[in-house]
Amino acid sequence: MRHPGFPVDHALPAAHIGGTAEAGYTATLKTVTGQQVLPIEELLAAAFSKRLRFGIAIGTSGQVEIFVSALHCWSCGSETQIVSGIHVVVGPNRFRFSVPHFDSHLGLFELIRHRLPSNRQIGVVRQRYSRTQGQSYLSNGCVHCDAIFGQFYDHDDGSTGEKICEFAIAIDGQWLEAIHNRDGWGVYPRQAE
């Protein structure tokens, strides 16, 4: 159980317990990306089956979800689709990324690129020079004229669009580096043996 002011760290699981005997008790855990609320019975079962864990370990199963948005190109005026968000879901955690985030993780983006459906009018994602920023970075382009859709365009918040595909991953060192903050307790699904 968690008392206000207790640190959340790897040495001691901490949860806020709430509810009533009539309605049932719940446990709220501080996860890597927010909170996870579950019945107290589920928390205890997870603790005894070693599914209550601190942080995200190498080998943990995850899911990548790719989102696209349709926009009119600022340069040629044609409609194009761009990759508007990439979500990585690991247990109770959802990490939201935009294309430029993968500029320093090009190997991971290649995994993503190969999963993009070929039957969609999605512009090529590649390194492009931005006059506004004075540098090159991984960016969306128009499918018709290849004009850059810049890093600060309103589509690049990593949370909008239509989900067009998802695929399973196993978290490795590259994914941990891309995710950055991995501290927090959570109940994770059983791992395949």
Image (cartoon, helix red, strand yellow):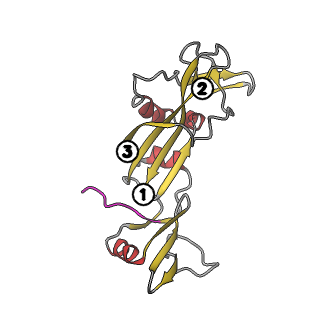
Residue extending farthest left = 193
Counting from the top left corner in percent of width and height, residue 62 is at: 40, 49
Q: Nearer the viewer, residue 183 or 147?
A: 147
Q: Nearer the viewer, mark 3 or mark 1?
A: 1
For label 1, the residue is: 91
* Residue 71 versus residue 19 in the image, above or below: above
The stretch drawn in magenta includes residue 49: no
Pointer 2 local density, CA inside 10 Å: few below 14, some 14–19, many at least 20: some
Callout 3: 10 Å neighbours few (<14), some, many (20+)? some
Which residue position holds label 3?
Answer: 169
The residue that mark 2 highlights is 71
Mark 3 vs mark 2, CA separation in Å: 29 Å
Tell me which numbered mark, 3 or 2, is placed earlier along the sequence: 2
Magenta-highlighted residues: 186-193
Under mark 3, the amino acid is Ile
- The residue under the point 69% across, 25% down is 135
Return the x and y of residue 4 as percentages of the image width and height: 63, 79
Helix, strand, or loop for circle 1? loop
Residue 132's place in the image compared with 107, above or below, is above
The image shows residue 54 at horizontal and vertical percentages of: 47, 66
Type of residue at label 2? Leu
Q: CA distance from mark 2 to mark 1?
A: 32 Å
